[in-house]
Amino acid sequence: MLKKNKTAVYALGQHISMSAHKARRVIDQIRGRSYEETLMILELMPYRACYPIFKLVYSAAANASYILDSNEANLIISKAEVNEGTTVKKFKPRARGRSFPIKRPTCHITIVVKDISLDEYVERDYLEWLKKPKWKKKYTDMTYHDMYSSEGVWDKK
């Protein structure tokens, strides 16, 4: 039976005050990259969404070092997603006693960090199965010469 080791941890930021579309623009740049490369990218990008994402990536790495006891050099961003949150609705007074609605969108950001140095499945039988050859010799009783020669199997009546 395979024993599954935990190799991934996450950090979740909820009700971040920005549009999900603007946060996805930054998240798409860091998905699948290493932890150190992600920090450099987030520090140099000029968007306002970078700072909360930077804090979440840093928090996910801290979770990984605490829970998995892993090194930061072995971490990659395996999954990063942005979902829409609730919309904060206010009313602004306008001329002639009317009101104008103001909608402030929020989003939820999830960063999953995976340690590539840890194996996900560990079992001795599985490792032995990997060493076995995947091919076997088929058609051992007949050769190519037997099938297509003039005295072969196909020509017998």
Image (tube, rainbow, N blue to C red):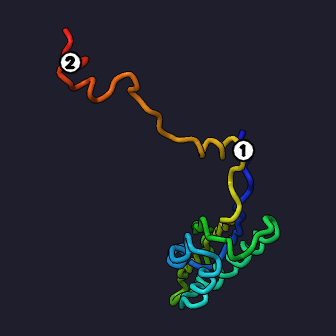
Look at the numbered disc 1 and give the secondary structure of its residue. Answer: helix
Quarter of image, res 42: bottom right
Tell me the quarter of the image containing the C terminus: top left
Of badges 2 and 1, nearer the viewer stands: 2
Report x, y in % for residue 57: 67, 76
Q: Quadrant of residue 84?
A: bottom right
Which residue in the protein does label 1 denote? 124
Viewer-side residue, 10 vs 156: 156
Q: Which picture quadrant has residue 59?
A: bottom right
Camera-side residue: 20 or 55? 55
- The amino acid marked with disc number 2 is Glu
Q: Which residue is mark 2?
A: 151
Residue 22 visible in the current orientation = no
Say whether residue 53 is left or right of residue 26. right
In the drawing, does residue 140 fall left or right of residue 18?
Answer: left
User: Residue at left 69%, top 57%?
Assistant: 119
Q: Can residue 144 be seen from the camera position used here? A: yes
Label 2 SS = loop
Q: Is residue 66 left or right of residue 97?
A: right
Front one among 10 and 82: 10
For the residue marked with disc 1, what is the amino acid? Answer: Arg
What is the spatial separation of the Cα atoms under label 2 and label 1, in whole angstroms?
A: 50 Å
Label 1 crowd (10 A; few <14 / some 14-19 / many >=20):
few
Q: Residue at x 71, y 49 (%)?
A: 122
Viewed as shown, does residue 156 lie left or right of 47? left
Sequence-wise, the earlier of marks 2 and 1 is 1
Residue 78 position, x and y percent, is 60, 65
Identify whether 142 is placed above or below 127: above
| Labelled disc at residue 89 | none
155 is higher (above) or lower (below) than 47: above
- In the picture, the quarter occupied by the N terminus is top right
